[in-house]
């Protein structure tokens, strides 16, 4: 069977988002698709420099073909366990900057982001909390699977409610380019993801809604031990150097002392457990 081939002389008119990667909303069949071109905004030297620094920190690479390959694998993995992600379309693209292995063509989905609904003051608090309660069991199920299978690709490296779409009957997860994560540290990766999601969300909410999110999380997230691990990640990290560095940061860095810092968010969470 011949693979479908698309040609674009110029992708600029289709630019949807530029965030290191380039995302293009392109015409496809009777609708649209999203063409994701990996790290076209960085030169080769910039990608190598950033990748080396990230590798030393146990984080992700910025090399386009690696990011592309891993995201394709991760999308398939998440879907195999019942988590909704973008479909990858079997299409070849002939266009500037689209080198083989450096891009993906993804289905186009129009749906609101979880973060936008949660911070929308025109919606009632009860409506938003009902959505959060819908989110928590699926979130927790993925964390338990990651730990049971020792599979770091089931942890969202870029944890944030802006990477979850709310569809009528399911949640859609995206931005899954994770690389350089260690299977023997999956519990730490999960702890960090929990802290990241809560920290990023609470910054955007009123104090009253912050309290309700924390209360509902403790009530409806499947594992209190997992929530406790988010606190331990920042206050009792198993690596002594990390523990010492974070103690210094909490004491001397003004950003770490803000009420919405990661440190304060996980502390507020732990106080409710």
Image (tube, rainbow, N blue to C red):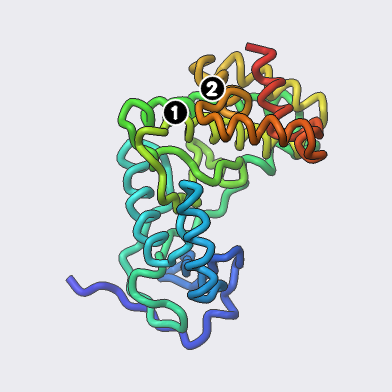
Residue at which label 2 appears: 229
Q: Position of residue 43 (x, y in %)?
A: 53, 76
Q: Position of residue 67 (x, y in %)?
A: 42, 59
Q: Earlier in the sequence, mark 2 or mark 1?
A: 1
Q: Residue at x 34, y 74 (%)?
A: 100
Helix, strand or loop for disc 1: helix
Relative to residue 128, is residue 85 depicted above or below? below
- 208 or 100, which is in the foreground? 100
Relative to residue 112, is residue 93 depicted above or below? below
Q: Residues within 10 Å of mark 1 (few under 14, many from 20)?
A: many
Residue 268 sits in which quadrant?
top right
Q: Position of residue 39 (x, y in %)?
A: 51, 68
Residue 218 sits in which quadrant?
top right
* Residue extending farthest left: 1
Helix, strand or loop for disc 2: helix
Residue at which label 1 appears: 187
- 258 or 112, which is in the foreground? 258
Distance CA(mark 2)–CA(mark 1): 8 Å
Q: Residues within 10 Å of mark 2 (few under 14, many from 20)?
A: many
Residue 7 visible within the image:
yes
Relative to residue 58, is residue 27 depicted above or below? below
**Quarter of the image with the N terminus in it:** bottom left
Q: Residue at x 66, y 41 (%)?
A: 115
Q: Residue at x 46, y 80 (%)?
A: 97
Q: Residues at badges 2 and 1 in contact (C-beta under 8 Å)?
A: yes
**Quarter of the image with the C terminus in it:** top right
Q: Residue at x 48, y 67 (%)?
A: 48
């Amino acid at each position: 069977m011949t693979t479908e081939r698309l040609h674009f002389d110029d992708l600029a008119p289709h630019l949807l988002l530029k965030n290191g990667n380039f995302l293009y909303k392109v015409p496809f069949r009777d609708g649209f698709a999203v063409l994701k071109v990996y790290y076209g905004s960085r030169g080769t030297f910039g990608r190598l420099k950033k990748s080396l620094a990230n590798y030393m920190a146990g984080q992700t690479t910025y090399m386009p073909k690696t990011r592309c390959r891993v995201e394709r694998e991760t999308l398939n993995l998440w879907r195999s366990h019942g988590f909704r992600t973008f479909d990858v379309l079997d299409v070849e693209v002939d266009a500037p900057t689209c080198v083989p292995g450096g891009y993906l063509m993804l289905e186009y989905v129009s749906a609101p982001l979880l973060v936008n609904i949660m911070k929308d003051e025109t919606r009632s608090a009860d409506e938003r909390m009902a959505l959060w309660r819908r989110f928590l069991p699926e979130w927790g199920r993925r964390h338990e699977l990651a730990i049971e299978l020792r599979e770091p690709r089931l942890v969202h490296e870029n944890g944030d409610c802006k990477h979850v779409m709310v569809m009528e009957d399911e949640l859609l997860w995206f931005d899954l380019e994770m690389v350089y994560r260690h299977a023997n540290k999956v519990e730490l990766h999960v702890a960090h993801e929990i802290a990241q999601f809560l920290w990023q969300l609470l910054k955007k909410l009123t104090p009253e809604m912050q309290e309700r999110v924390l209360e509902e999380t403790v009530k409806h997230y499947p594992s209190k031990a997992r929530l406790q691990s988010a606190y331990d990640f920042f206050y009792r990290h198993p690596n002594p150097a990390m523990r010492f560095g974070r103690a210094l940061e909490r004491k001397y860095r003004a950003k770490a002392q803000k009420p919405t810092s990661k440190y304060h968010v996980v502390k507020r969470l732990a106080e409710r457990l």
